[in-house]
Image (cartoon, helix red, strand yellow):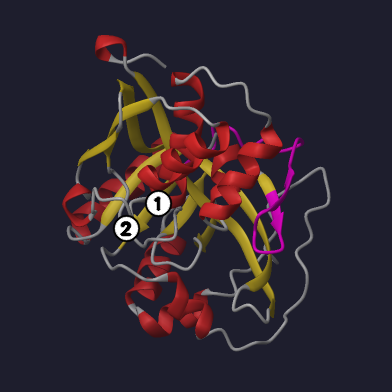
Amino acid sequence: MAGPGGSLLETAYAKINLALHVRARLPDGYHRIETLFAFCKDGDELRAEPADGLALTIDGPFGDALSDGPDNLVLRAADALRQVADVEAGAVLHLTKNLPLASGVGGGSGDAAATLRLLTRLWGLTIDREMLHAIAAELGADVPACLLSQTCYGAGRGDELQPIESSEWAGTPVLLVNPRIAVETGPVFAAWDGADRGPLDVAEPLELDAAWRNDLEAPARAIAPEIGAVLDVLVAAPSAQFVRMSGSGATCFALFESVEARDSAARAIADAHGGWWTMPSTLR
């Protein structure tokens, strides 16, 4: 998408985990998981225009909490792409941070993935999907899925991906809710009890399954008990079809039968819990 003044635009789509089964703790400190990713049509927004070097500015509701220095995943992704593609092109990047930080919806990973998509277009690069996937995997376990940004099964660290072609969930109303509590991923995984509760069944044609778990919910709730309150509110919402915590929390979500039911739930939550963050959206 083109922006003002010849700039290009890209959305960093919010990620949700319809299921997240933790199967084993690996020797390198990571975990072997099986997960089902889905993506909302909304998220952070990234804009870029050509420049000699790389620079980043940030605004948005959660922009103040984010560094615009070289440790930011947007600049790390841009630098990695430039090195792998062996180009000298630069860009001025502007990130509008709409998603809360450390919230389980892939905000930083989505920003990195959006950067790779955006700068591939801006710089006119011819680069194959495998190379982009490899760059994404070096930036973080969720970045490859966010690069794809479509419903997919993830294994290994979550970066061994299998797109789900049979999903008919596009356009499904979804409501994301976060109690405005940042929950870092590392401590949640570290607090996982180590019990393998079984594999994730994603046989096609794919349908929502009550047996899909998020094995990180219990450790996340121990760290941030407010997650339990969010889940209770979403489960009680009329016409909520499927409720889970996303990723390592604290964001939770509900899929709804209709836009009207979703919006009614969003209004009720805003009235009763004015301090919580909500994002009505639809699945891609």
> Could you tell whether 265 is left or right of 211 in the image?
left
- Indicate whether 115 appears above or below 3: below
User: Three-letter amino acid code at disc 1?
Assistant: Gly
Magenta residues, start to end: 153-173
User: Three-letter amino acid code at disc 2?
Assistant: Leu
Task: Check residue 172 for magenta coloring.
Answer: yes
35, 116: nearer the viewer: 116
Image quadrant in which you'd find residue 200: bottom right
- Residue at 68% across, 29% down: 128
- Residue at 62% across, 21% down: 126
Query: CA separation, marks 1 and 2?
Result: 8 Å
Q: In the structure shown, which secondary structural element does the residue marked by tag 2 occupy?
A: loop
Total marks drawn? Answer: 2
> Could you tell whether 275 is left or right of 132 in the image?
left
- Residue at 39% across, 66% down: 250
Percent across and percent down for residue 251 are 40, 61
- Indicate whether 47 appears above or below 257: above
Residue annotated with mark 1: 108
Percent across and percent down for residue 132 are 61, 38
Task: Check residue 279 for magenta coloring.
Answer: no
- Residue at 35% across, 56% down: 177
60, 91: nearer the viewer: 91
Percent across and percent down for residue 175 are 41, 48
- Indicate whether 145 appears above or below 233: above
- Contact check, label 1 and label 2, Cβ < 8 Å: yes
Image quadrant in which you'd find residue 269: bottom left
Q: In the structure shown, which secondary structural element does the residue marked by tag 1 occupy?
A: helix
Residue annotated with mark 2: 101
Can I make out residue 261 in this image?
no
Other-residue count near label 1 (Cα within 10 Å), few / some / many at <14 / 14–19 / ≥20? many
> Could you tell whether 27 is left or right of 38 in the image?
right
Q: Nearer the viewer, mark 1 or mark 2?
A: 1
